[in-house]
Amino acid sequence: MVASGESDATLALRARDGNRKAFDQLIIRHKVPLYRLVRRYVGNPDDAYDVLQESLIAAWLALRRYDPAREFSIWLRAIALNKCRDFARRQAVRGRFLRLLAFQRVDEQVVSELSSKETIDDVRLQRLDEMIATLPVFYKEPLLLTMVTGLSQQEAAAQLRTTPKAIEMRLRRAKKKLAEALSDLTWEG
């Protein structure tokens, strides 16, 4: 039986020894923030769910390599970020033409769906998610780790193996790129 008060490291060690319930408890603890990170990274809820599942499977298969001295959430986020990067590489293979075609469809959908305030907000949020998903990884990862996951700039720097100053610079540029990309949207209802 798994006690819910056990630390992540203890649960991970039990899971590493084959205790599926311990792993399930870890997933219950971490899947919501992990999904938010992946969702913002890939930009599509269905794709995010698939990438999340790939991440959890990879975590289960990699448990033997987990170091209990390392924080489990950081280890799990690193796996998820790698799966997001893999997803992004697969998507890039589809080519620029398909992305442009998809954006054209989204723009047509935006025009046709602007009938209610709730729909307008949904469209804006969808557009923001799409713009975040198209940011270069260099800017996207610090943005997601700080704004979605809630890490400090110092924690994000440790996760991405860089300096807090570099994270600060990347965040500033990511926000500027988003502001430029979204400048054509009217944010008032």
Image: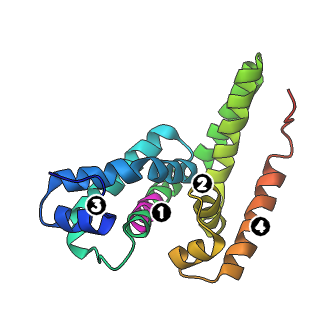
Of the two numbered discs 1 and 4 on the same chain, state the one appearing first in sequence: 1
Whichever of labels 1 and 3 marks the residue nearer the N terminus, that label is 3
Q: Earlier in the sequence, mark 3 or mark 2?
A: 3
Taking the image as shown, residue 22 lies to the left or right of residue 83, namely: left
Residue stretch in magenta: 78-86
Check residue 148 in the rendering and tell me which mark sits there, or answer none. Answer: 2
The residue lying furthest to the top in this view is 115
Q: Position of residue 128 (x, y in %)?
A: 70, 44
- Residue denoted by label 3: 6
Answer with the quarter of the image where residue 156 lies.
bottom right
Disc 3 from disc 2: Cα separation? 26 Å
Determine which residue is flagged by label 4.
173
- Judged from the image, the secondary structure of the residue bearing numbered disc 4 is helix
Q: Quadrant of residue 78?
A: bottom left
In contact (CB < 8 Å): disc 2 and disc 1? no
SS assignment for the magenta stretch, majority: helix
* Label 2 Cα crowd, 10 Å radius (few <14 / some 14-19 / many 20+): some
Separation (CA) of disc 1 from disc 3: 31 Å
Q: Nearer the viewer, residue 130 or 71?
A: 71
Q: Which residue is mark 1?
A: 85
Residue 85 within the segment the image draws in magenta: yes
Of labels 1 and 3, the one closer to you: 3
C-alpha span from label 2 to label 1: 17 Å
What kind of residue is marked 3? Glu
